[in-house]
Amino acid sequence: MLHIKKNMLNDGLLLPMLAYGTATAIFQQDCGRWVKMAYLESDMAHFDCAECYGNEDSLGKAVKELGLPREEVIVVTKCNTPDPRKALERSLVKYVQETGLGKAWKMMEELRNEGKARSIGVSNYRVSDLEETLNSTKVIPSSNQIEVHPYVYDKAKPIIEWCHNKGITIACYTTLASIIYFPRGPVDVVVKRIAEELDATEDQVLMKWAYQVTYGGIIVTTSCKKESLQGQIRAFSDMKDLSHVQIQAIIDAGKGMHQRVYEHYMDDE
Ligand SMILES: NC(=O)c1ccc[n+]([C@@H]2O[C@H](COP(=O)([O-])OP(=O)(O)OC[C@H]3O[C@@H](n4cnc5c(N)ncnc54)[C@H](OP(=O)(O)O)[C@@H]3O)[C@@H](O)[C@H]2O)c1
């Protein structure tokens, strides 16, 4: 079994670089079967979830049925509410917008201090959102989960750099967008060539690229196929890094088309 390398967040939490996402193909569905497959077949114990994916219960049930010790499992959850306490305690009844980001972050800090969350981060935050948050606290988020792939890299670069300078780990989703959502774009031929050069597959190259351009970020992926997952794990166990020239060739090809999968804002939009 290949072992996924680990990464340390700014609060000391050590977690595998590759996470198994429970949205996309298994959004709003019982994800237990796939979570068990990811763990039993590919040794993945870092799961990415969210309140709005509608499957937290099945993730929790699967983790329990697998009998995994708490320290072995990383479950990332996200809530779209300024009251993370209610979300985390599962008594959320409705979304409210009027509380600021700073106040929500204070609650997250309390939850961490109470031991209800081991690490606290954000998702789809722009530089301005992070500045607003940090204005009212000294606790820096451990991670910011955002869309990262070659067709969005130019727009994502400012937030990637900003987070890097503050020690905030980027967690990347939709890293395979050029294959899955926008095939036959300008990036494909370059990624194919690099895959041949590295004796790797195209998805491995794209994931490794995302990892490197985010200074060692976390990659969140989803597949219901154990062969795909096991191939992707190789990118984070024994595959060598892309060279600067290869990294730059993908960046340059990505500039040929701007395409976003999700309608989240970035600073220059
Ligand atoms: N924070 C946010 O706003 C946010 C937004 C989106 C996603 N996410 C997180 O990120 C996770 C990953 O989502 P994603 O959109 O980034 O998914 P992805 O990993 O880019 O793609 C997953 C989909 O691609 C297919 N796939 C995987 N490997 C493939 C390959 N080599 N060739 C062709 N198809 C392949 C899978 O199908 P098969 O099952 O057939 O392999 C699956 O349907 C989500 O589950 C969620 O946890 C977070």
Image (tube, rainbow, N blue to C red):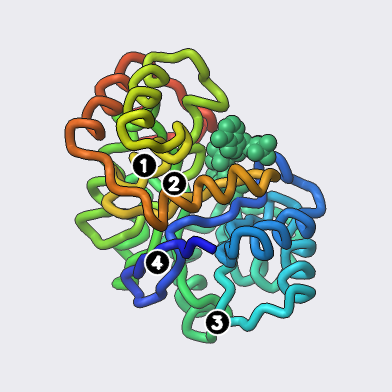
Q: Which mark is residue 246?
A: none
At 50% from the left edge and 46% from the top edge, which residue is drawn? 232
CA distance for labels 1 and 3: 27 Å
Sequence-wise first label, 4 or 3: 4
Badge 1 is on which residue? 210
Three-letter residue code for mark 4: Lys
CA distance for labels 4 and 2: 15 Å
Sequence-wise first label, 4 or 1: 4
Q: Residues within 10 Å of mark 4 (few under 14, many from 20)?
A: some
Three-letter residue code for mark 1: Ala
User: Which of the 4 quarters of the picture holds residue 87?
Assistant: bottom right
In percent of width and height, residue 13 lies at: 41, 75
Quadrant of the image for the C terminus? top left
Q: Is mark 2 within 8 Å of ligand 1?
A: yes
Badge 4 is on which residue? 6
Give the SS element for disc 1. helix
Circles 1 and 2 in contact, beta carbons < 8 Å: yes
Badge 3 is on which residue? 71
CA distance for labels 1 and 2: 7 Å
Give the SS element for disc 2. strand
Q: Nearer the viewer, residue 201 or 257?
A: 201
Relative vertical location of residue 43 with respect to residue 256 in this rendering, above or below = below
Badge 2 is on which residue? 172
Three-letter residue code for mark 2: Cys
Three-letter residue code for mark 3: Glu
Q: Does residue 182 show up?
A: yes
Q: Residues within 10 Å of mark 1 (few under 14, many from 20)?
A: many
Position of 76 with respect to 250 (left or right) is right
Sequence-wise first label, 1 or 2: 2
Q: Is mark 3 within 8 Å of ligand 1?
A: no
Give the SS element for disc 4. strand
Give the label, 4 or 2, closer to the camera: 4
